[in-house]
Amino acid sequence: MAAIYFIRHGQASFNSDNYDKLSPTGIKQAHALGTALKQRGVQFDAVYAGSMVRHAETAEGCLTAMGCDLDPVIIDGFNEYDHEEVLFKHRPEFSNKLNLAEYLAQHPNPHKAFQAEFELALHRWRGGDYDHEYDETWQHFNQRCVNALNQVRNNRNAKSIAVFSSGGPISVVTGHCLDLNDAHIAELSWSIMNCSITSLLYNKDKITLRYFNDFSHFEYGEDKSLLTYR
């Protein structure tokens, strides 16, 4: 069977003017991941990525550290959903970042407060009652991720494939393999660490989960600052 290694991007630049860019920590994570994969003896004979900047920067750092000179094939289906649209449709006032910052500052744990609001926003998006308000519905997002996965599976020549993507698509393809419902798929995404690996095995007849959210290359490393969720 062939193996697909889904790699979540490194830490993005949260709370900055350009979220879609790796933070300094994210750049370190990408290089550390590539070094760990090289030490494990992993070699890729095909590489794919979403079209986001954080996907490209993660792929560049990881592949350089591995000594892999393959250029990623871009598949837009592996892009993350628009998290800002999802949040702003739930709380329109948060489209003004000052309002969001003031709201979070009122809470003793701003990260927990943001998480609570974002979970409510995701529930609204998944529910389907407000599909007409979104540029991309939850169902469409799921289908494009599965379509992207099937596009990779059509590569009959590769036996070890890397896909650089985001937490949302990785949770969808994992849920697709395990036949999970929407709520469980959404729950998976909260646990996916930056630059973690989720591996699938497949042949022409079936696809199965090999392992999920492996971040042991950071967990057992000396620099614990590389253990991040977002």
Image (cartoon, rainbow, N blue to C red):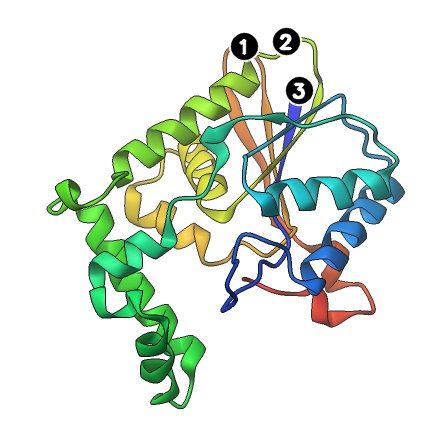
Q: Which mark is residue 204?
A: 1
Measured as percent of width and height from the top left, residue 91 is found at 22, 66
CA separation in Å, label 2 and label 1: 9 Å
Decide: marks 3, 1 in contact (CB < 8 A)? Answer: no
Residue 118, horizontal then vertical, whole percent: 33, 64
Q: Earlier in the sequence, mark 3 or mark 1?
A: 3
Badge 1: few (under 14), some or many (20 or more) residues near its Cα, within 10 Å?
few
Please indicate whether residue 117 sits to the left or right of residue 105 in the image. Answer: left
Kind of element beneath mark 1: loop
- Label 3 sits on residue: 2
Q: Earlier in the sequence, mark 2 or mark 1?
A: 2
Residue type, numbered disc 3: Ala
**How far is disc 3 from disc 2 in space, using C-alphas?**
9 Å
Q: In the picture, residue 72 is in which quadrant?
A: top right
Quick one: which residue is furthest to the left in this view?
Answer: 129
In what element is the residue under mark 2?
loop
* Above/below status of 51 relative to 88: above
Q: Is residue 157 above or below residue 129?
A: above
Q: Position of residue 192 (x, y in %)?
A: 53, 54
The alpha-carbon separation of the residues under discs 3 and 1 comes to 10 Å
Q: Is residue 106 left or right of residue 170?
A: left
Say which residue label 2 marks: 156
Residue drawn at x 50%, y 58% as measured from the top left: 191
CB within 8 Å, label 2 to label 1: yes
Residue 40 in view: no
The residue at 30%/77% (across/down) is 99
Image quarter in which the C terminus is found: bottom right
